Amino acid sequence: MKKIILFFVCTILPAVLLSQTPTAPSGKRWQKVNILSDEFNGDKLDETKWDDYHPHWSGRPPSAFKKGNAFVEGGYLKLRSTLKRDPSTVNNPLKNVWVNSAACVSKGWDAKPGYYYEAKFKASSLSMTSSFWFRVGDFSEIDVIEHIGNPSIEKRQKDLPFEYAANTHYYGKHKGLKNKKAKWKMPTRGRDGFHTYGFWWKSANELLFYYDGKEVMKIVPRVPFNENLKMIFDTEVFPFAQAGVPSIGLPKVENLNDNSKNTMMVDWVRVYELKDEEKVNDKISFKNTPTDLSQETEYTFDIEYTAATDREIVVGFYKDDNWVASGKVNVGKGRGVASVKVILPELPVAGNGYSLKSHIRPLDTTWRNAIDNDEINNVSISKKFSQIIPNGTYYITSASNSQRLLSRALENHSARMHDSGNFNDQRWIFTHINNNVYTIQNKLTLRYLEVPFAKCENGTDVATWKQAIASHQQWQIVENSKGSYSFKPMHCPDLALDRAAGVLNANVQIWNYNKTNANQQWKIIEDTNINNRNLLSPSILSKKIETDKFLVYPNPSKEVLYMSGLNVGDEIAILNIQGQEILTFTTKNKKEVVSIGGLSKGIYLIRKNNKSLYRFIKE
């Protein structure tokens, strides 16, 4: 999917799929209909959902649908109209076929009254239709939009490229009824950019049409439209004034041969049905909140919540049951995790007697109106944290002998012990996240130490993986005695990295943590052959992120990131360390400036075109 944000300011948008569905009736909610929805992000058309031609109609002369002219490429459904033969070689260019048009038709008769349909697309720049419509029933046709992107008749350039034309037609037992249509003038031309065209088949007698989420037209059909239909995207030549569209002129040969003009591009189509709303009770709880905090003047706490409607979530910070400070966020109806920042007036005194209290309440009310609450007592504050191992490259060595931890492809990226050697498969890049939690990356393979499948069982073998965005790929380092450390996987902190049975060349596993267990004692020895403190691989942290000419700097950064080496139309996403999208946008220039002032401190990921991951630090 491609989410577009034209420019960044300091506001950071939540990473949710922003549907443009109409407001659901009371007691109802919209739910996606997957059989008719498609993001077109694969490498080919989903043959379980679509035909790449029109199986029930050959097309409108002088055009005819060509199988394969509808295809998926670059995250879009593309409907390309092409030249079949030169119009000068046919007897009558108005009637004899010389244009190959395109159609994409749903496999089943799944479109029905009650659904809301929306498609985001850009029209072709041809004197042909770019259409989104429904037919193949017994008597009805609904044209959500038949749009002429670039009429060959010059005088029509003033109106048709701005026209949103909807229509209804009648066949079978209702043949002879006059079509009933509606028109609306769009603020921009359909060929100039992507817009969302929506249609709520609200009932058999009420058809509502939307533009970028706003209702703009309504048609009451002449007879009830109460049959299932197929959903269709297509292109057609309109040689004469017909279907409510005035004469537009035939498409130009040079435009049919120009792929920048001859293609209707559909970003996505999404369909929703109304379902009974689930009864929701307001509920709140702290999520993964530690009870041992280091001295800071601000803290961020994750709160898991269920909200029956728009609510406020408040987190209070207390010392000896006396209020010190609190933070508040607003959340919408539904379930989720909210991050609440609490800013203290001064650095708290190290010690015990602290507590955290949270509650959920109606908007613009007080604690007296709390609906649900949660509390964590016996919170202690330790002196301001000092990072136990600086960022850099290290050998992970057994405290009992000289063997080192390595990982390499020839052993399926397993983690095991081996005699020491001057090889990158024995070097590990430590990157601090917070509170002595690190990602640990093999310098040879650039893969990260992890517990596969997030298992939390004694004897689970440890390996490496190509990303480190989940807790089973992050390790807390604890010092058992001077110079001796243990590694605890964050998803399962009661276990630790363990040399199986303590034998030479042992596989490395996780086992119940015991600070006196010799098999869990490790030396972390800095690689002194290179000065790589703070130097990490190009795919993660460095003062600049630079891969394939894509450059992000400064890194770390407080307020803005500068990105260069982009292509117009690149899809960029910023994710938190858990892999949740925080912000997405489509580039409009080869260089972009991104405001990150609203992000909390920590490590974030940058995803480019839904493929590569890079990291940066927000200070």
Image: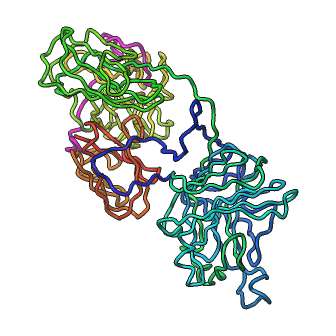
- The answer to whether residue 416 is visible is no
Residue at point 29%, 51% (across, down)? 9
Q: Quadrant of residue 261?
A: bottom right
The x, y position of residue 364, in whole percent, is: 32, 27
- Seen in the picture, residue 545 relative to 104 is either above or below; the reply is above
Residue 514 on the magenta segment: yes
Q: Nearer the viewer, residue 594 or 538?
A: 594
Q: Is residue 294 left or right of residue 106?
A: left
Residue at point 44%, 61% (across, down)? 569
The x, y position of residue 294, in whole percent, is: 20, 21
- The answer to whether residue 145 is visible is yes
Q: Nearer the viewer, residue 424 or 454?
A: 454
Across the whole image, how many numbered discs are drawn on residues? 0
Residue at point 24%, 36% (across, down)? 391
How was the colour assigned to the protein in this rendering?
Answer: rainbow
Q: Quadrant of residue 375?
A: top left
- Seen in the picture, residue 64 relative to 254 is either above or below; the reply is above
Residue 242 on the magenta segment: no
Q: Nearer the viewer, residue 399 or 390?
A: 390
The x, y position of residue 177, in whole percent, is: 80, 62
Q: Is residue 522 left or right of residue 499?
A: left
The x, y position of residue 10, in whole percent, is: 27, 47
Q: Which residues are magenta?
A: 508-535
- Name the quadrant of the C terminus: top left
